[in-house]
Amino acid sequence: MSTSNSNFRPAVVLFAGLTLIVGVIYPFAMTGVGKVLFNEKAEGSLIVQDGKTVGSSLIGQSFSSPKYFWGRPSATGPMSNNAGGSSGSNLGPTNPALIDAVKGRIEALKAADPGNTAKIPVDLVTASASGLDPEISLAAANYQLARVARERKLPESQVKAIIDQLTQQPMLGLLGEARVNVLALNLALDKASK
Protein backbone atom coordinates (compact mmCIF):
# COMPACT_ATOMS: atom_id res chain seq x y z
CA MET A 1 0.00 0.00 0.00
CA SER A 2 2.66 2.48 0.97
CA THR A 3 4.62 1.79 -2.24
CA SER A 4 1.66 2.66 -4.49
CA ASN A 5 0.93 5.80 -2.44
CA SER A 6 4.56 6.85 -2.60
CA ASN A 7 4.48 6.53 -6.44
CA PHE A 8 1.10 8.22 -6.85
CA ARG A 9 2.03 11.62 -5.43
CA PRO A 10 5.19 12.15 -7.56
CA ALA A 11 3.29 11.00 -10.66
CA VAL A 12 0.52 13.55 -10.06
CA VAL A 13 3.04 16.33 -9.33
CA LEU A 14 5.04 15.45 -12.47
CA PHE A 15 1.85 15.34 -14.57
CA ALA A 16 0.67 18.71 -13.24
CA GLY A 17 4.12 20.28 -13.67
CA LEU A 18 4.55 19.08 -17.26
CA THR A 19 0.99 20.14 -18.11
CA LEU A 20 1.76 23.62 -16.79
CA ILE A 21 5.10 23.86 -18.63
CA VAL A 22 4.14 22.26 -21.96
CA GLY A 23 0.46 23.21 -22.05
CA VAL A 24 0.54 26.77 -20.68
CA ILE A 25 3.97 28.37 -20.27
CA TYR A 26 5.56 27.15 -23.53
CA PRO A 27 2.62 28.12 -25.83
CA PHE A 28 2.34 31.58 -24.24
CA ALA A 29 6.12 32.09 -24.48
CA MET A 30 6.20 31.07 -28.16
CA THR A 31 3.20 33.29 -28.93
CA GLY A 32 4.95 36.22 -27.21
CA VAL A 33 8.22 35.62 -29.06
CA GLY A 34 6.31 35.34 -32.36
CA LYS A 35 4.44 38.60 -31.75
CA VAL A 36 7.63 40.45 -30.85
CA LEU A 37 9.94 39.11 -33.57
CA PHE A 38 7.50 38.22 -36.37
CA ASN A 39 4.34 40.19 -35.60
CA GLU A 40 2.93 40.27 -39.16
CA LYS A 41 3.39 36.53 -39.64
CA ALA A 42 2.11 35.72 -36.14
CA GLU A 43 -1.05 37.66 -36.97
CA GLY A 44 -1.65 35.59 -40.14
CA SER A 45 0.08 37.80 -42.74
CA LEU A 46 -3.23 39.54 -43.40
CA ILE A 47 -3.58 41.88 -46.38
CA VAL A 48 -5.56 44.98 -45.48
CA GLN A 49 -6.84 47.38 -48.11
CA ASP A 50 -8.84 50.51 -47.34
CA GLY A 51 -9.14 49.39 -43.71
CA LYS A 52 -10.69 46.04 -44.67
CA THR A 53 -9.01 42.64 -44.48
CA VAL A 54 -9.12 41.12 -47.97
CA GLY A 55 -7.11 37.95 -47.39
CA SER A 56 -3.81 36.51 -46.28
CA SER A 57 -0.58 36.34 -48.23
CA LEU A 58 -0.23 32.75 -46.96
CA ILE A 59 -3.48 31.24 -48.31
CA GLY A 60 -4.53 31.20 -51.94
CA GLN A 61 -7.87 32.56 -53.08
CA SER A 62 -9.95 31.47 -56.01
CA PHE A 63 -10.35 33.91 -58.92
CA SER A 64 -12.48 33.01 -61.92
CA SER A 65 -12.94 36.28 -63.80
CA PRO A 66 -10.69 36.54 -66.88
CA LYS A 67 -9.53 40.00 -65.74
CA TYR A 68 -7.72 38.37 -62.79
CA PHE A 69 -4.68 36.14 -62.63
CA TRP A 70 -5.72 32.64 -61.64
CA GLY A 71 -3.85 30.75 -58.97
CA ARG A 72 -2.96 27.13 -58.69
CA PRO A 73 -5.98 24.80 -58.60
CA SER A 74 -7.07 23.69 -55.15
CA ALA A 75 -7.79 20.11 -54.11
CA THR A 76 -9.58 21.16 -50.92
CA GLY A 77 -13.01 19.94 -51.95
CA PRO A 78 -16.09 21.65 -53.26
CA MET A 79 -15.22 24.95 -51.56
CA SER A 80 -12.02 26.02 -53.31
CA ASN A 81 -9.08 27.12 -51.13
CA ASN A 82 -10.78 25.92 -47.95
CA ALA A 83 -8.06 25.86 -45.28
CA GLY A 84 -10.16 23.46 -43.19
CA GLY A 85 -9.88 20.85 -45.94
CA SER A 86 -6.20 21.33 -46.70
CA SER A 87 -4.72 18.19 -48.19
CA GLY A 88 -3.50 16.80 -51.44
CA SER A 89 -5.71 14.89 -53.84
CA ASN A 90 -3.53 11.79 -53.48
CA LEU A 91 -4.15 10.97 -57.13
CA GLY A 92 -1.22 9.32 -58.88
CA PRO A 93 0.00 10.43 -62.32
CA THR A 94 -1.79 7.56 -64.09
CA ASN A 95 -5.08 7.96 -62.22
CA PRO A 96 -7.89 8.65 -64.74
CA ALA A 97 -9.51 11.18 -62.36
CA LEU A 98 -6.31 13.25 -62.30
CA ILE A 99 -5.92 13.02 -66.08
CA ASP A 100 -9.54 14.16 -66.57
CA ALA A 101 -9.10 17.03 -64.08
CA VAL A 102 -5.95 18.25 -65.85
CA LYS A 103 -7.66 18.00 -69.26
CA GLY A 104 -10.59 20.04 -67.92
CA ARG A 105 -8.25 22.72 -66.56
CA ILE A 106 -6.38 22.90 -69.87
CA GLU A 107 -9.68 23.33 -71.73
CA ALA A 108 -10.75 26.12 -69.34
CA LEU A 109 -7.44 27.97 -69.87
CA LYS A 110 -7.70 27.63 -73.65
CA ALA A 111 -11.35 28.76 -73.62
CA ALA A 112 -10.44 31.86 -71.59
CA ASP A 113 -7.62 32.79 -73.99
CA PRO A 114 -8.07 30.96 -77.33
CA GLY A 115 -5.29 32.89 -79.07
CA ASN A 116 -2.66 31.85 -76.55
CA THR A 117 -0.49 29.12 -78.06
CA ALA A 118 2.18 29.14 -75.35
CA LYS A 119 2.92 26.00 -73.38
CA ILE A 120 0.67 25.86 -70.30
CA PRO A 121 2.74 25.84 -67.07
CA VAL A 122 2.16 22.78 -64.91
CA ASP A 123 1.20 24.81 -61.82
CA LEU A 124 -1.90 26.11 -63.61
CA VAL A 125 -3.31 22.62 -64.16
CA THR A 126 -2.19 20.58 -61.13
CA ALA A 127 -3.23 21.06 -57.52
CA SER A 128 -0.60 21.45 -54.84
CA ALA A 129 -0.10 19.20 -51.85
CA SER A 130 -1.82 21.65 -49.50
CA GLY A 131 -4.35 22.95 -52.01
CA LEU A 132 -3.76 26.45 -50.65
CA ASP A 133 -0.80 27.81 -52.62
CA PRO A 134 -0.93 31.61 -52.63
CA GLU A 135 1.69 31.95 -55.37
CA ILE A 136 2.23 30.98 -58.98
CA SER A 137 5.43 30.64 -60.97
CA LEU A 138 6.61 33.42 -63.26
CA ALA A 139 5.81 31.13 -66.18
CA ALA A 140 2.19 30.87 -64.98
CA ALA A 141 1.96 34.65 -64.55
CA ASN A 142 3.49 35.32 -67.98
CA TYR A 143 1.14 32.76 -69.57
CA GLN A 144 -1.86 34.77 -68.32
CA LEU A 145 -0.38 38.24 -68.91
CA ALA A 146 -1.92 38.92 -72.36
CA ARG A 147 -5.42 37.82 -71.28
CA VAL A 148 -5.40 39.95 -68.13
CA ALA A 149 -4.01 43.01 -69.94
CA ARG A 150 -6.63 42.66 -72.70
CA GLU A 151 -9.51 42.22 -70.22
CA ARG A 152 -8.39 45.23 -68.17
CA LYS A 153 -7.55 47.34 -71.24
CA LEU A 154 -4.04 47.92 -69.93
CA PRO A 155 -0.79 47.78 -71.92
CA GLU A 156 0.98 44.44 -71.52
CA SER A 157 4.12 46.33 -70.50
CA GLN A 158 2.28 47.84 -67.51
CA VAL A 159 0.98 44.43 -66.37
CA LYS A 160 4.47 42.96 -66.86
CA ALA A 161 5.96 45.76 -64.74
CA ILE A 162 3.54 44.93 -61.91
CA ILE A 163 4.47 41.24 -62.15
CA ASP A 164 8.18 42.16 -62.04
CA GLN A 165 7.64 44.48 -59.07
CA LEU A 166 5.86 41.77 -57.04
CA THR A 167 8.15 38.88 -58.01
CA GLN A 168 9.68 37.10 -55.02
CA GLN A 169 13.08 35.63 -55.76
CA PRO A 170 14.21 32.18 -54.53
CA MET A 171 15.27 32.13 -50.88
CA LEU A 172 19.02 32.80 -50.65
CA GLY A 173 19.02 32.78 -54.44
CA LEU A 174 18.90 28.97 -54.43
CA LEU A 175 15.83 27.53 -52.73
CA GLY A 176 12.65 27.33 -54.75
CA GLU A 177 11.89 29.40 -57.81
CA ALA A 178 10.82 32.95 -58.54
CA ARG A 179 7.11 33.36 -57.84
CA VAL A 180 4.30 35.89 -57.55
CA ASN A 181 1.58 36.12 -54.90
CA VAL A 182 -1.71 35.98 -56.83
CA LEU A 183 -3.79 38.02 -54.36
CA ALA A 184 -1.18 40.79 -54.14
CA LEU A 185 -0.89 40.82 -57.94
CA ASN A 186 -4.66 41.08 -58.47
CA LEU A 187 -4.98 43.81 -55.85
CA ALA A 188 -2.19 45.79 -57.52
CA LEU A 189 -3.95 45.42 -60.87
CA ASP A 190 -7.24 46.59 -59.36
CA LYS A 191 -5.44 49.68 -58.11
CA ALA A 192 -3.78 50.27 -61.50
CA SER A 193 -7.10 49.89 -63.34
CA LYS A 194 -8.85 52.65 -61.35
Image: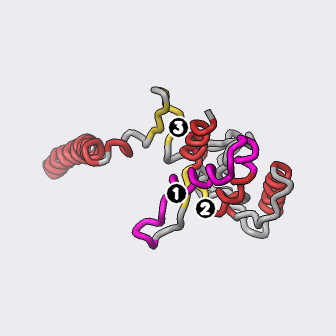
Q: Which amino acid does label 2 sit on?
A: Leu
Secondary element at image label 2: helix
Q: Is residue 101 magenta?
A: no
CA gap, disc 1 and disc 2: 8 Å
Q: Where is residue 170 in the image (x, y as percent from the top left)?
A: 47, 66
- Check disc 3 and report the residue beneath it: 55
From which residue to which does the magenta span run? 147-174
Which residue appears at 55% of the width and 57% of the height? 164
How would you rate the neighbour count of disc 3 (Cα within 10 Å): few for under 14, some for 14-19, many for 20 or more? some
Residue 8 visible in the shown view: no
State the residue in front, 93 or 103.
103
Quarter location, residue 141: bottom right
User: Residue lying furthest bottom in this view?
Assistant: 174
State the residue in front, 181 or 161.
161
Asked if labels 2 and 1 touch by Cβ distance under 8 angstroms, the answer is yes
Secondary element at image label 1: strand
User: Residue lying furthest top in this view?
Assistant: 51
Residue 105 visible in the shown view: yes
| In the rendered image, the vertical position of residue 116 relative to residue 191, given as above or below | below
| In the rendered image, the vertical position of residue 122 relative to residue 39, given as above or below | below
Which residue appears at 68% of the width and 48% of the height? 155
Which residue appears at 72% of the width and 67% of the height? 92
- Check disc 2 and report the residue beneath it: 138
CA gap, disc 3 and disc 1: 19 Å
- Check disc 1 and report the residue beneath it: 167
Quarter location, residue 157: bottom right
- Tell me which label, 3 or 1, sits earlier in the chain: 3
